[in-house]
Image (tube, coloured by chain):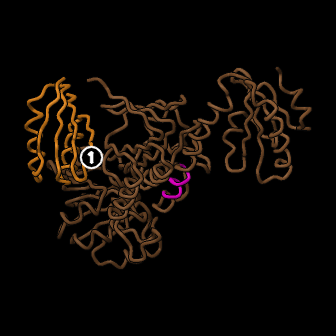
Chain colours: A brown, B orange
């Protein structure tokens, strides 16, 4: 089967709240934008039943409902969606390559918004009972099917306790396995107090999962008491794991910088170690992972991707001037000393307007991307390029005379 | 490496999934099955099933509420 080739300005890997927001910004900036999502648009937020802390929804909203709105808004700005898995990436060149099983895509800029997947306990026989066979990661999805049954929740973080309380609305009994001492949980105080008072919730302190048992479908979770090493066989219908997430960064491990846990490292502009490649949302090494913060990441990356593409075009066409001589004046529009030089540069450039020398004025106030490409940190300054290379840089005494001596033809 | 089409428009769960299971059994390794569906539940369970089988899956939204699930039989 011959693979198709499709070209985009921006490709966003992952269609959760961060990716969708980046899509909205890119689409609105009239960039040809593609979002590739491997399962359902909306990402992790769609697994949360209730979102009460996302501003603009005083009565709260469902994760799925909120993400449908994000999706609709991205579509309105002409963003294309492709629901498939990314198999391979090559991000090094100016044109980034992204491979899915049917299509090879190229993009000028890539935004990684691939999020994470639920962490497993690694206990015995876990792989035999995943998803529809008794180990679930989504209370919203599987609560109703556990009406009047006994379920177990592993973990004591916000997700574990809040989802556990949600499960009590359906299940007859919710057993929570907590690895800490009696009364100690990782969740917030409000959730903790509510959970401790919930008559349907039962806590098993100092326990971790040792194994899973069942006949085709899970029926018993074997817990181990960390203090006594005693094994406890607990009969349950479904076991819910809420013990954190792992970032989806497998395909980037040879190209992007990540921390020990595999989260991608970025700066405040969401830039990774490769120019034109950004990372946003849960996949990024950051402090607070929420829809509200993912949206902020997406907005920054969408804006920066647009700037990056625009600057690449300016750089190629104007600054490099097809290898012919080029003079670049870099100034800060917010700095008076810089601005006073503008008439000097304009007069100088009109003298050379009929030659092969190209003269550009670049304001670094809003973005220093072009200055970075030229490795210039001092402003105001003038760079002289020939054969696509910076030959010399002038930072003092910029005047008509010094410029005439500065250029070499 | 042929392509086959399966029309499941207007059919609700679990019929599209059952038709897919039956059809894919007839295909050879490397063949591609393109399933047309317009039931949002099938748009979840058909790809989920195909992925658990280890097949390559891609979904195209061809129209509002209408999808093509493309499945490559890899083994």
* Residue A200 seen in the current view: yes
x and y percentages locating residue A166 in the rendered image: 30, 70
Q: Residue A286: x, y in percent?
A: 55, 53
Highlighted magenta segment, given as a residue range: A295-301
A296 falls in the magenta region: yes
Depth order, front residue of A203/A163:
A163
Q: Quadrant of the C terminus of chain B?
A: top left
Query: Badge 1: few (under 14), some or many (20 or more) residues near its Cα, within 10 Å?
Result: some
Is label 1 in a helix, a strand or a loop?
Answer: strand
Q: Image quadrant for the N terminus of chain B?
A: top left
Residue for badge 1: B61
Residue extending farthest front:
A354
**Majority secondary structure of the magenta segment?**
helix
Q: Viewed as shown, does residue A47 lie left or right of A94?
A: left
Residue A207: tell me if it is visible: no
Q: Where does the image place residue B41, in percent across and percent down from the top left?
A: 19, 54
Tell whether A396 sits left or right of A294. right
Position of residue A336 relative to residue A326, above or below, is: below
Q: Quadrant of residue A143?
A: bottom left
User: Eyeballing the image, is A165 above or below A372?
Assistant: below
Quarter of image, res A407:
top right
Question: Which residue lies at the image location 53% right of the left edge and 58% below the top edge?
Answer: A296
| In the displayed structure image, the side of residue A116 where residue A176 appears, left or right | left
Q: What's the chain of the residue with tag 1?
A: B
């Amino acid at each position: 089967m011959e693979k198709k080739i499709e070209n985009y300005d921006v490709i966003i890997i992952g269609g959760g709240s961060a990716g969708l927001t980046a899509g909205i910004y890119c689409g609105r900036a009239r960039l040809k934008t593609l979002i590739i999502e491997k399962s359902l648009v909306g990402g992790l937020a769609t697994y949360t039943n209730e979102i009460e802390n996302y501003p603009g929804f005083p009565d709260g909203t469902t994760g799925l409902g909120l993400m449908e709105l994000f999706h609709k808004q991205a579509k309105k700005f002409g963003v294309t969606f492709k629901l498939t898995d990314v198999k391979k990436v090559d991000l090094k060149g100016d044109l980034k390559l992204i491979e899915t099983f049917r299509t090879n895509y190229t993009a000028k800029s890539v935004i990684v918004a691939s999020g994470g997947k639920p962490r497993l306990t690694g206990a015995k026989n876990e792989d035999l009972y995943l998803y529809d066979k008794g180990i679930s990661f989504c209370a919203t999805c599987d609560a109703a099917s556990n009406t009047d049954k006994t379920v177990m929740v592993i973990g004591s973080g916000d997700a574990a306790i809040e989802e556990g309380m949600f499960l009590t609305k359906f299940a007859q009994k919710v057993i929570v396995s907590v690895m800490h001492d009696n009364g100690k949980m990782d969740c917030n105080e409000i959730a903790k107090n509510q959970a401790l008072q919930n008559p349907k919730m039962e806590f098993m302190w100092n326990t971790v999962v040792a194994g899973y048992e069942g006949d085709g479908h899970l029926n018993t979770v074997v817990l181990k008491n960390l203090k006594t090493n005693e094994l406890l066989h607990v009969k349950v219908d479904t076991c819910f794991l809420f013990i954190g997430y792992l970032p989806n960064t497998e395909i980037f491990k040879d190209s992007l910088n990540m921390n020990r846990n595999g989260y991608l490292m970025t700066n405040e502009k969401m830039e990774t170690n490769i120019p034109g490649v950004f990372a946003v949302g849960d996949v990024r090494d950051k402090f607070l992972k929420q829809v509200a913060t993912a949206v902020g990441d997406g907005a920054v990356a969408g804006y920066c991707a647009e700037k990056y593409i625009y600057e690449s075009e300016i750089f190629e066409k104007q600054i490099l001037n097809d290898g012919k001589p080029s003079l670049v004046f870099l100034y800060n529009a917010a700095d008076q000393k810089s601005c006073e030089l503008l008439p000097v540069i304009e007069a100088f450039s009109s003298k050379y307007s009929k030659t092969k020398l190209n003269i550009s004025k670049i304001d670094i106030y809003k973005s220093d991307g072009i200055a970075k490409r030229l490795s210039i940190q001092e402003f105001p300054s003038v760079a002289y390029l020939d054969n696509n290379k910076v030959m010399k840089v002038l930072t003092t005494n910029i005047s008509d005379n010094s410029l005439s001596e500065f250029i070499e033809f | 490496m042929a392509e086959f089409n399966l029309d499941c428009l207007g059919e609700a769960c679990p019929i599209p999934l059952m038709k897919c299971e039956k059809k894919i059994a007839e295909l050879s390794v490397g063949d591609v099955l393109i399933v047309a569906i317009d039931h949002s539940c099938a748009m979840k369970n058909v790809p989920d099933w195909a992925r658990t089988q280890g097949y390559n899956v891609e979904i195209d939204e061809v129209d509002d509420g209408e999808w093509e699930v493309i499945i490559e039989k890899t083994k």
